[in-house]
Amino acid sequence: MRRYGKHTDEDDIRSRPNRKGNRPRTHIRPKHEDAAEGLVLTVDRGRLTCLVEGRVVMAMKARELGRKAAVVGDRVAIVGDLSGDKDTLARIVRIEERASVLRRTADDDDPYERVVVANADQLAVVTALADPEPRPRLIDRCLVAAYDGGLTPLLVLTKSDLAPPDKLLELYGHLDIPYVVTSRAELEDGGAADRVREHLQGRITAFVGHSGVGKTTLVNALVPEERRRTTGHVNAVTGRGRHTTTSALALPLSGADGWVIDTPGVRSFGLAHVDPSRVIHAFPDLETGTQGCPRACSHDEPDCALDAWVADGHADPARLYSLRRLLATRERTDGD
């Protein structure tokens, strides 16, 4: 039995209505050519705080973006109420292409990749020289993520009043990574902040570090008008600090042209998202020595040229150990 008459293309045939309205369904999405450009400053439970033409605007992600999520540092297109008035809510309709991405996983066995920050130029790796003790392998992992994501690294060593920086600087000094050494007294009088600020001028810098290393204290010194609660306790047994920064936050750098992004303290920095063949790029002092390696060398086998390279004094043996520890961790992940 025919559902319609002979002429099925008649004008009076109704299109199927939307379940939540009376407009016909369509796959055509609006272009929003009049959308304003915004910068995501922080994300909290589905609400995004954005900077739009000098105003702080609250926004939410448009449904048409699907599962694509905006993160701190993203450049986005926003429509709706952009006044920034209380109880107003705009809508993010587009996430612009990212120039760089800092990613991490909870550990090397975690397949879920987390985008920490987008569009940062620099990654400041903050580590204490004591209380808690420095963790070189965590620093190495941050360097791997920085190189892989297109960020240039900066080392910031804190609490130099508790321990000298010589040993750690000797381990990383030949990598040509810029560094700043600070103490608690220098942070209080502003001298250390001024020296760190010189490396941040004109850049978007994400700060990462182990809990309790003084990262948020440093950010407070760099952006005093936006002070965040700092940690006041490092566990005497575990050597770990409490998390006091619970979400990433972008802040304009005081007295200079640049941005500081404070991120939550990390206790691990998984690299499940990084191809093992790219890990060597984070070790430029060793990368040159791989020219004599056999094809598809894993850099942890008897014929690897890196053993002779290190034995000849071209690189620190501790760096080769750290590289192979990372690679071994990634290989175990790949085999699971």
Image (cartoon, grey):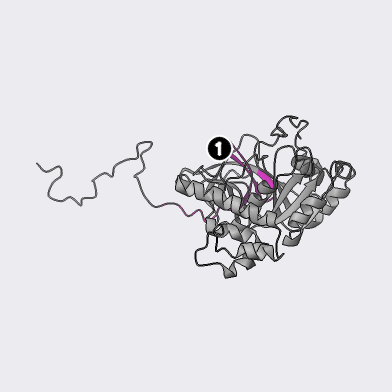
Q: Which residue is mark 1?
A: 46
Q: Residue at x 68, y 63 (%)?
A: 311
Dividing the image into 4 quarters, which one contains the N terminus? top left
Q: Is residue 148 left or right of residue 231?
A: left
Instruction: Residue 121: give x, y in percent of width and height.
Output: 67, 57
SS at mark 1 in the image? loop
Instruction: Residue 174: give x, y in percent of width and height.
Output: 75, 61
Instruction: Residue 288: give x, y in percent of width and height.
Output: 64, 68
The 10 Å Cα crowd at callout 1, few under 14, some 14 to 19, many 20 or more, is few
Q: Nearer the viewer, residue 173 or 149?
A: 173
Q: Amino acid at mark 1?
A: Gly
Dividing the image into 4 quarters, which one contains the C terminus? top left
Instruction: Residue 281: give x, y in percent of width and height.
Output: 61, 61
* Above or below: residue 64 compared with residue 244: below
* Above or below: residue 294 compared with residue 97: below
Magenta stretch, residue numbers: 29-56
Q: Nearer the viewer, residue 205 or 31?
A: 205
